[in-house]
Amino acid sequence: NVANTANITSFFAHLQGDFSAGTLNLNNTYNLSGGNLTVGDFTGPGSFVWNSGSLYDTNDLYIDNNNGYLPGAATLTNGRHLSVAGLLAVGVNQGGSLSVVDFTDVTSATGRIGGAAADGQTASVLLGVDNYAGWYITNGLTMGDDVLAELRIEDGTRVRVGYTSQFSSGDDPLANAYISTVPGGVSNITIDGANSYLEVANNLYLGGDAAGPKGGGTLELTNGDGLVDNLVVGGVLKVWDDYTLDAVDGTALFSSLDVAGIANFGTRHFDTVAEGITISTSGGTLNTQSIDFGTQDFTGHGTLNARITTDADIIATGDLTLGDLNDYNAVSIAGTIYTGTHTVKVHKKGFFTLSNNSVS
């Protein structure tokens, strides 16, 4: 039983009750430094009763069903603050869950949900109940499990990667998020509610990492009101082969979008020049209302199911389909369509007129 402020330095690998599961009761503020903290035993989680105050960990913190520092199902509520100087990992060994609710926030240098050796168990993180709850990750987030990893952001809560607090700006502008990094695994993200959002300072890779595709899953925006951006990516938003981005019922912002999987934007109208963004496809399918490329060339292959307008060129790097069979104004290209050795299909209701020099 720990009351008031406590500083505990552990020079051993674990601090635990006994071999039949221990119990740690904490009130007020707790500082952990030196070693690792395990509450429980070698066969399963123990009991961690955190009544109030803050928990500061100067190392890494694991929440796991097998010898986690905290029990495998941890709920942070009642205004508690968790600060981890290193990695905050949820369910990387045998699954686990973390719920951050009710005036509670979490900060960590890095974050991890799930792991390649998760032994068939689910790893999940939930943020909800009120709009004061948040997880702020300074240097990067990795999410991937050999079975299922889940992240739910609800009720006006938030996860910010590359930031130390709700209102900070640019703490690590190079911080990335890698989602579904385990081949064959599934990592799902749900962002629900008008004020809920995920923000990544630099690049967000869905279904893999910077090197290539890995796992599958879906990032879904639900119940957005169009007033708050539910997904904000400062750099590249990459949708890899087996991943789906469903942004029909919410707003997504990015500097650059490349689709190798599926990206759904519903009735969204993109104006790449006015918005200062780039859009490309690498064999994937992009569904949206319309895209005006202005003076930007489009380069890619795959499918653009949208009304396409451009004053520049279309450059096919593989077979390409663009337009909308139900729209008389589906395709308007002032520049040249460069097909190379590939097939370019133009979908448009009515006629599509080509000038003498518009295809190469």
Image (cartoon, helix red, strand yellow):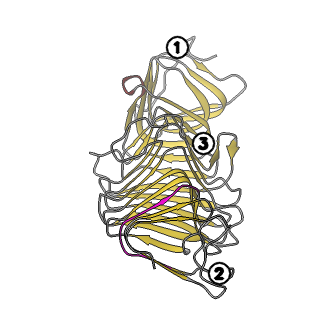
Position in image of residue 300 (x %, y %): 61, 30
Q: Are marks 2 and 3 in contact (CB under 8 Å)?
A: no
The numbered mark, 2 or 3, whose residue comes first in the sequence reads 2
Nearest-to-viewer mark from 2 and 1 = 2
Identify the mark at residue 355; answer none if there is no mark: 1
Nearest-to-viewer mark from 1 and 3 = 3
Residue behind mark 3: 284
Magenta part of the chain = 48-59
Disc 2 packing (10 Å; few <14; some 14–19; many ≥20): many
Disc 1 packing (10 Å; few <14; some 14–19; many ≥20): few
User: Mark 1: which secondary structure?
Assistant: loop
Residue type at mark 2: give it: Asp
Position in image of residue 308 (x %, y %): 45, 30
Q: Image height check: is 242 above or below 236?
A: below
Mark-to-mark CA distance, 2 and 3: 47 Å
Residue at the limit of the structure toward the bottom, as seen here: 20
Position in image of residue 284 (x %, y %): 60, 42
Nearest-to-viewer mark from 2 and 3 = 2
The numbered mark, 1 or 3, whose residue comes first in the sequence reads 3
Q: Image height check: is 309 above or below 12?
A: above
Q: Is residue 294 left or right of residue 343?
A: left
User: Mark 2: which secondary structure?
Assistant: loop
The numbered mark, 2 or 1, whose residue comes first in the sequence reads 2
Identify the mark at residue 41; answer none if there is no mark: 2
Q: Image height check: is 24 above or below 118?
A: below
The verdict on residue 193 being magenta is no
Q: Residue at x 53, y 20 (%)?
A: 297
Q: Nearer the viewer, residue 214 or 354?
A: 214
Identify the mark at residue 48; answer none if there is no mark: none
Position in image of residue 259 (x %, y %): 57, 40
